[in-house]
Amino acid sequence: MRLDKFLSQQLGISRSLVARELRAGLVTIDGDVVKSGSFQVMIDHEVAYDGNVLVQVTGPRYFMLHKPQGYICSTDDPTHPTILYFIDEPLAQKLHSAGRLDIDTTGLVLLTDDGQWSHRITSPKHHCEKTYRVQLSEDIGTDVAKQFEQGVMLNGEKYPTRPAQLEIITPRDVRLTISEGRYHQVKRMFAAVGNHVCGLHRERVGDIHLDETLEQGEYRPLTDEEINSITVPSK
């Protein structure tokens, strides 16, 4: 990668500003000052800016985060704190969430810089399952599980939802598994049967379950098995 592009990504500044920093002699590679933006940075080079070594990121990255309430899944927002607040990684701003959660929803968020991988989660054609723990304001109707299994019409939609599985834990505490990702789908499904969601927590995406050892706001890298459960199509 060209040095000016590398510095632009690492420092979050334009290439014109990078050129100024290079001319000022603030950039070294393996201890030697380099002023040419066209210099090709290799993986074994130690690049430093103003005496601080910049960490090179190699290969795609995959993480799970236990999202708390009050944070949005965008990487940049002028009015609300984002989930990147919790991610202490080089070039964290290059990560994106593979399937967002609402600001008031907690639970499993997957982050990556691998666009093809996240597409397998979010693309409607792949029908990636997501499981939610749902707290309701009213007792669940006895026929709701059957309605969800058959599909329900959401307000403003032309087609019913795909079949979904409802597990009733208590009359106001249920677990719902869906295989699509319409806008505010879980809340709208319960609204369609006359109920209201007052608490929502995502437990699972595909075969990846939220790590029970993670407290809210904590994250960890995915294991190879977890990564491949999304990458490799199910037979």
Image (cartoon, helix red, strand yellow):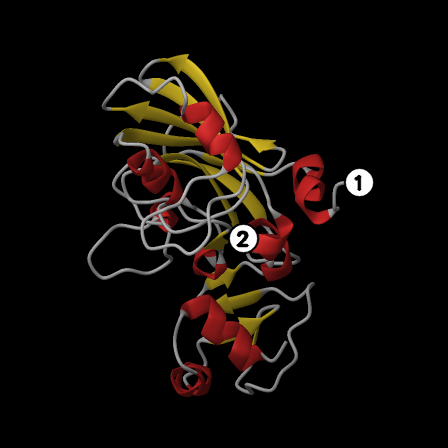
Q: Residue 134 or 194: which is nearer the viewer?
A: 194
Where's residue 100, x and y in %? 42, 48
Residue wearing tag 1 = 235
Residue 49 visible? The answer is no
Dot 1, crowdedness within 10 Å: few (<14), some or many (≥20)? few
Q: Is residue 153 above or below residue 139?
A: below
Residue 8 to residue 61: above or below: below
Question: In the displayed structure, does residue 15 sit left or right of residue 141?
Answer: right
In the rendered view, does 1 fall on the left or right side of 95?
right
Residue 47 visible in the snapshot: yes
Quarter of the picture containing the C terminus is top right
Q: Residue at x 39, y 17 (%)?
A: 142
Circle 2 is placed at which residue position?
122
User: Residue at 51% across / 61% down in the picture?
Assistant: 53
Give amino acid for label 1: Lys
Label 1 secondary element: loop
Q: Is residue 123 left or right of residue 96?
A: right
23, 168: nearer the viewer: 168
Decide: few, some or many residues near mark 2? Use Cα within 10 Å; few <14, some 14-19, many ≥20. Answer: some
Image location (x, y in percent) of residue 106: 35, 34
The N terminus lies in quadrant: bottom right
Q: Secondary structure at mark 2?
A: helix
Distance between mark 2 and mark 1 Cα atoms: 19 Å
Residue at left 28%, top 17%? 139
Q: Residue furthest top?
A: 170
Residue shown at the point (52%, 81%) measured from the top left = 4
Which kind of residue does numbered mark 2 sit on? Answer: Thr
